[in-house]
Amino acid sequence: MDLRLAGQGALVTGSSAGIGATIAHMLADEGCDVLVHGRDAGAATVVAEQVAARGVRAEVVLGDLTEPGVAEQVALTARDFGARILVNNAGPFAEHDWESSGPADWRAAFEGNVLPTVRVSQTLLPSLRAHGWGRVITIGSRAVRTPLPNMAAYSAAKAAVVNMTTSLARHLAGTGVTANCVSPGVIVTPSMARMFEERAGADEGSATGAADGPDEARIVAEYAPNPSGRLGRPEDIAAAVTYLASPLADYVNGIELRVDGGITGTP
């Protein structure tokens, strides 16, 4: 299916690895030029080279979005790049329960997941509005609907991301710019594999291969039971983001699209 994205420009924050890199690849496969963002120049350059190999334009912008002025500068670089699609993917994940978490942990969760999304979006919005078409896509979490007690601060921060995405969609009414959120379930990435390893005390090889090896059924049963009976892949999230970025999703606005295998149940 042609998603009619050829020639569009996109900024994907936190796209030097993991889900963000997969989103960048899939947007490029649909013909999007992609501005790859990260904090590590080497990792971001590798992804940009992979994107460019798909026949589109790719550039790199670096910076820690939690540092003063960096999010705004990244957004201005995206404006000059011609980005009409913003994927707010960057955001730290940490486990802190109600007993162990302190003010610094809560502050870090909101400063890493909420404020960069606000700052990048606010800075890029005038350009999108002036163009008369655009997409703002945020990344939430299954923890929004099923808050996890061992991820108290993270769950609350991601709930804020979903809330403000709906608010933004209403703010942008009639502009041609939509705002939607994709909330992943349990997605197998290197960081998630490490978490499985720590939880199960497994060796590095079995944890890293959890998505395709014999441990997936155990992990699903013990940690993430869901009707689909498997763990998610970065491609599952990238496919949802790419659809929402496309003109085919013009009438989809202000939603939280849960891509979680059904782990959160019905609305």
Image: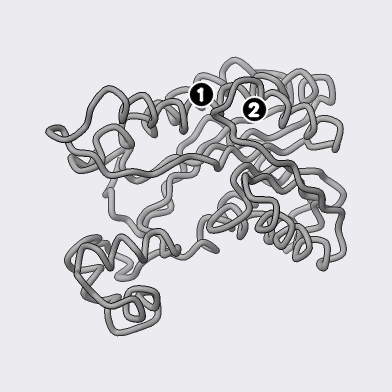
Write the residue at 37% across / 53% down: 185
**Residue 153 vs residue 29: left or right?**
left
Residue 108's place in the image compared with 226, above or below, is above
> Amino acid under label 2?
Ala
Q: Position of residue 191 (x, y in %)?
A: 41, 59
Quadrant holding the C terminus: top left
Q: Amino acid at mark 1?
A: Leu
Q: Are marks 2 and 1 in contact (CB under 8 Å)?
A: yes
- Left or right for 14, reference 9: left
Point out the residue furthest to the top here: 171
| Image position, residue 253 (x, y; %) | 57, 32
Nearer to me, 157 or 4: 157
- Give the quarter of the image for residue 19: bottom right
In the picture as drawn, the residue positioned furthest to the left comes out as: 99
Which residue is at 24% across, 35% downward?
152
Q: Earlier in the sequence, mark 2 or mark 1?
A: 2
Tell me the element at label 1. helix
Q: Residue at x 21, y 61 (%)?
A: 223
Q: Quadrant of residue 98?
A: top left
Distance of label 2 from label 1 (alpha carbons):
9 Å
Compared across the picture, whether 37 is left or right of 112 comes to right
Q: Residue 248: x percent and y percent?
A: 70, 47
**Res. 243 visible in picture:** no
Compared with 78, 182 (above or below) is: below
Q: Position of residue 28 (x, y in %)?
A: 76, 58
Residue located beneath label 2 in the image: 71
Residue in front for this viewpoint, 34 or 7: 34
Give the residue pinned by disc 1.
115
Quarter of the figure that contains the N terminus? bottom right
**Residue 54 visible (yes or no):** yes
Q: Secondary structure at mark 2?
A: helix
**Tag shown at residue 26:** none
